[in-house]
Image (cartoon, grey):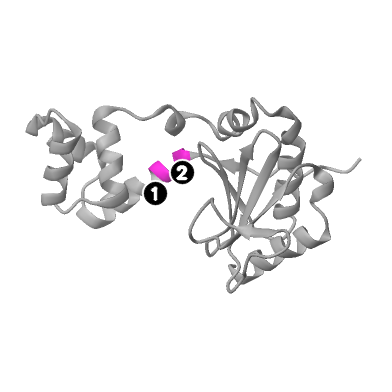
């Protein structure tokens, strides 16, 4: 019997870990120490906390992490990767097999990390994100591709998913995941690994 490879799909927890690591590297203090400092300041709203953190040199992901630590994490930040993906396809179950086929094709290309977010899934090589998968309509999954110099034309449309992905292709069934789309996916992976 053949074993079926099911890739690990990461969620926001890894983003939290990365943000905590950045905070420690940039300031020398971890999340717990910063949470204690924030409690002592008694800042009552997010705007005041962000202003204070900026004055302390805490910006970007590290700042967002501390704001969520103080005022609470949104539901999608505490959801598992499976919960996020299920939520994306809850009202369009006929598209889930297409999503699964895209993930299987992408992970067969090499070392690919699947990162679930609230409304899309990123496909990440060791270097950077090379594609994003999003159930954009009730009957379509869009795959945005980071292809240098790619121009919209034919099945490739201008990407609406992310500005680093110049083109996207819309798929309505696993049959649409044909050799042309697989070649684009592989090209995006190769360019960005």
Task: Examine the rendered structure and indicate whether residue 91 appears above or below residue 167.
Answer: above
- Disc 1: which residue: 18
State the residue in front, 86 or 27.
86
Residue 111 position in % (x across, y down) = 65, 59
- Which SS class for mark 2? helix
* Mark 2: few/some/many CA within 10 Å (<14, 14-19, 20+): few
Type of secondary structure dominating the magenta stretch: helix
- For label 1, the crowd category at 10 Å Cα-Cα, with few meaning under 14, some 14 to 19 and many 20 or more, is some
Q: Is residue 151 left or right of residue 72?
A: right
Describe the element under mark 1 as helix, strand or loop.
helix
Q: Quadrant of residue 179?
A: bottom right
Relative to 134, residue 160 above or below: below
Circle 2/circle 1 CB separation < 8 Å: yes
Q: Which residues are magenta?
A: 12-16
Comparing 140 with 146, the one in front is: 140
Percent x, y of residue 61:
32, 48
Viewer-side residue, 187 vs 158: 158
Q: Residue furthest bottom?
A: 149
Q: Is residue 109 left or right of residue 14?
A: right
| Picture quadrant of residue 147 | bottom right
- From mark 2 to mark 1, how far is it between C-alphas? 6 Å
Q: Does the segment drawn in magenta span residue 75? A: no
Instruction: Return the mark for residue 54.
Output: none
Q: Which residue is mark 2?
A: 14
**On the rendered image, what quadrant is the N terminus found in?**
top right
The residue lying furthest to the right in this view is: 1
């Amino acid at each position: 019997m053949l074993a079926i490879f099911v890739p690990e799909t990461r969620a926001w927890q890894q983003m939290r870990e990365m943000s905590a690591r950045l905070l420690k590297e940039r300031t020398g203090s971890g999340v717990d120490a910063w949470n204690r400092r924030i409690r002592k300041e008694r800042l009552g709203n997010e705007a005041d906390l962000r202003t204070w953190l900026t004055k302390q040199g805490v910006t970007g992901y590290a700042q967002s992490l501390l704001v969520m630590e103080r005022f609470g994490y949104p539901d999608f930040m505490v959801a598992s990767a499976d919960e996020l993906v299920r939520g994306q396809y809850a009202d369009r179950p006929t598209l889930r097999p297409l999503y699964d086929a895209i993930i299987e094709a992408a992970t067969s290309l090499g070392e690919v990390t699947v990162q679930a977010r609230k409304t899309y899934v990123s496909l990440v090589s060791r270097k950077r994100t090379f594609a994003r998968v999003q159930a954009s309509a009730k009957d379509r999954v869009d795959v945005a591709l980071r292809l240098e110099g790619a121009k919209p034309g034919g099945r490739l449309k201008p990407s609406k998913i992310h500005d680093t992905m110049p083109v996207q292709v819309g798929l309505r069934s696993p049959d649409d995941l044909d050799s042309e789309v697989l070649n684009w996916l592989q090209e995006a992976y190769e360019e960005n690994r």
